[in-house]
Amino acid sequence: MAEEPKSKTPWLQAVFTENLGMSEGLALASTVLIILILSAALAWFFYTAPPSVITITTGPPGSSFETNAARYQEILARSGVRLVIRNSQGAQENLTRLENPKERIDVGFVQTGITNVSLSGRTNAVVSLGSISYQPLLVFYRGATRQLLSQFKGGKLDIGPPGSGTRLLALELLHLNDLQSNDFSIVDLEPNKASQALRDGSIDALFLMGDTASPQLMRDLLRDPDIRLFDFTQADAYTRRLTFLNRLTFPKGVIDFGKDIPDRDVQLIGPAVELLARSKLHPALSDLLLEAAQEVNGKAGLMRRQSEFPAPLLHDFPISADALRFYKSGKGFTYRYLPFRLASLVNRFVVAFVPAIVVLIPGLKVIPALFRLRVRLRLYRWYRALLGVERDLLADENGSSRARLTQRLDQIDETVNQVKIPVSFADQFYVLRQNINFVRARLKDTQDKSSS
């Protein structure tokens, strides 16, 4: 029994040529197209994978910014994402890092109002994931009660390190009170040393916020009977002049109920803290960070109610589309019910390969149909020529055109025999050749009759 000839054509290309009726050239083009589309889908599948490591810029060691980041780090680790913490001098340095692509910082804590008083300005490269807390400005001082910041004229003030949001806000408030840089002296001390300097009278006032000091240090100062907390009696006026500020109330007795510390409600002012990110942050990581913020910052605290934060409050930067989607409907469907990495694989497969399949299936149906139509049109052309010969034969009553008709039929036969037809059209091809032979036999019969 004779063996079937083995095709040297690649498997996928043979599928198109033998089963779909394509020419070898079109089959090759279709094969290349499929490979390109699937390669693009595969590349997109890996390109859109969320990174396993991201970096956050916080504040000095021990600051509330660093404390929050450490708790975020533990929560993200549950999903297999490592959060690298980089300390800084505070909010202003955090914003500078986020705006500088060379720093390779993904997220950071920045207080509102920074872009209003700094030179960095706004940038489309940075977006907000929402506000995570209020950041009260606490001004501690010794001596007689003071009701105006202008009463610190001529004093030695520690207003936070350069690069911190504390210093930027403190300078803005002092300038609003007509205090110029020569009206007071700035002392730059590390927070713990500054606290001790205030206790022993080396400085007159200490400005503290969460980006530069630990909550415990603030509590220790509040418990010191020789230290007073400045009461912003003009809080409403400050919030109207500086719209990024919020009026906050430090409740009576909230530090120590037994000792009634503080012994009265204290009016404070302060910005909100935003969780800023690079605009190219992966959506899945945006969801993880906001989920961590809900767990860490959603609890009730001294300056916030239960579930008040995180919140999409509009401030200096636009809220990212991914964050808005999270606030509106929560995490994506797959991330709600599957582990993070598995959900990421499912999502990326759907995004990368489903569109490719949607494009390929109609394309693979249309291309063969068009090719079959093209082959049929070629067959119809030869049938048209063959019908022309038969019509002329019927019209040639005296047989004068028989030789010319025979020559035309020979040309048709020769041309058809040289044409390559796909296997799927073999039956139609052989029918055409039978019809050519039928016309040839009829032409011969007429010639024989005329001879006799």
Image (spheres, helix red, strand yellow):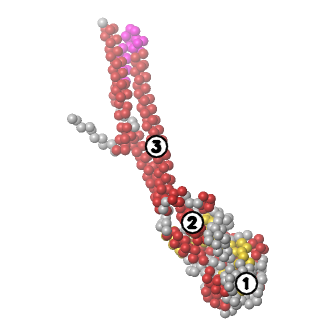
Above or below 134: residue 342: above
Q: Where in the figure is residue 265, as x and y percent of width and height?
A: 74, 79
Viewer-proximal residue among 142 and 385: 142
Sequence-first disc among 3 and 1: 1
Above or below 169: residue 197: below
Which residues are the magenta region? 392-413
The residue tagged 2 is 291
Amino acid type for the residue under numbered disc 3 = Ile
**Label 1 neighbour load within 10 Å: few <14, some 14-19, many 20+:** some
The residue tagged 3 is 361
Sequence-first disc among 1 and 2: 1
Viewer-proximal residue among 101 and 172: 172
SS for tag 2? helix
SS for tag 1? loop
The residue tagged 1 is 263
Amino acid type for the residue under numbered disc 2 = Glu
Query: Looking at the rendering, which quadrant does residue 443 occupy?
Result: top left
Classify the position of the N terminus by image quarter.
top left
